[in-house]
Image (tube, rainbow, N blue to C red):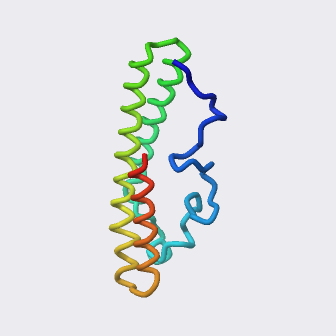
Amino acid sequence: MTTAGASDLPDTADGTDGSRGDSGAAASGDDRCSAHAATGEHGYSKDKDAHLKRLRRIEGQVRGLQRMVEEDVYCIDVLTQVSASTKALQSFALRLLEEHLRHCVAHAAKEGGTEMDEKVEEATAAIARLMRT
């Protein structure tokens, strides 16, 4: 089984290095969400501790993958763990998307105007990225 080196693989599912570029993907978001400006919170803020706990668990899964490779574990067993880690990240992403829709998009819909269209476009693009993974 051959594997690519870390430098051969993109850092994100869409093949980019995760930097903001024109998409705004890595920006803090504070200046892009009127709901954040109005409430001082992001959609995920009320469950932040639970989200961080979940991300730490996923981080542990990825570290486990590194150990498995270091210990020359059978390829299929490593792939099984990759699948579990991927599923965990996808589940986290869907939860975050739901919170974004309920908080940021809903606030923009109440406000109306062009921000609503921007938030719907932004959410649609995020869904498209999630579907490609």
Question: Is 7 left or right of 114, judged from the image as shown?
Answer: right
Camera-nearest residue between 50 and 81? 81
Who's the residue at 52% across and 50% down the image?
14
The furthest residue to the bottom: 113
Camera-nearest residue between 2 and 64? 2
Who's the residue at 45% across and 54% down the image?
129
Above or below — where is 11 with respect to 119?
Answer: above
Who's the residue at 51% across and 12% down the image?
72
Q: Position of residue 98 (x, y in %)?
A: 33, 60
Tell me the quarter of the picture where residue 6 sits: top right
Q: Position of residue 28 (x, y in %)?
A: 57, 62
Tell me the quarter of the picture where residue 11 sits: top right
Camera-nearest residue between 46 and 12? 12
The furthest residue to the front: 2
Above or below — where is 8 with respect to 17?
Answer: above
Q: Position of residue 95 (x, y in %)?
A: 34, 53
Above or below — where is 105 with respect to 111?
Answer: above
Above or below — where is 111 with respect to 44?
Answer: below
Who's the residue at 57% across and 64% down the image?
23
Q: How many marks?
A: 0
Question: Is 120 left or right of 72, judged from the image as shown?
Answer: left
Q: Position of residue 73 (x, y in %)?
A: 46, 13
Question: Is 24 left or right of 89, judged from the image as shown?
Answer: right
The furthest residue to the right: 7
Question: Is 84 left or right of 27, judged from the image as shown?
Answer: left
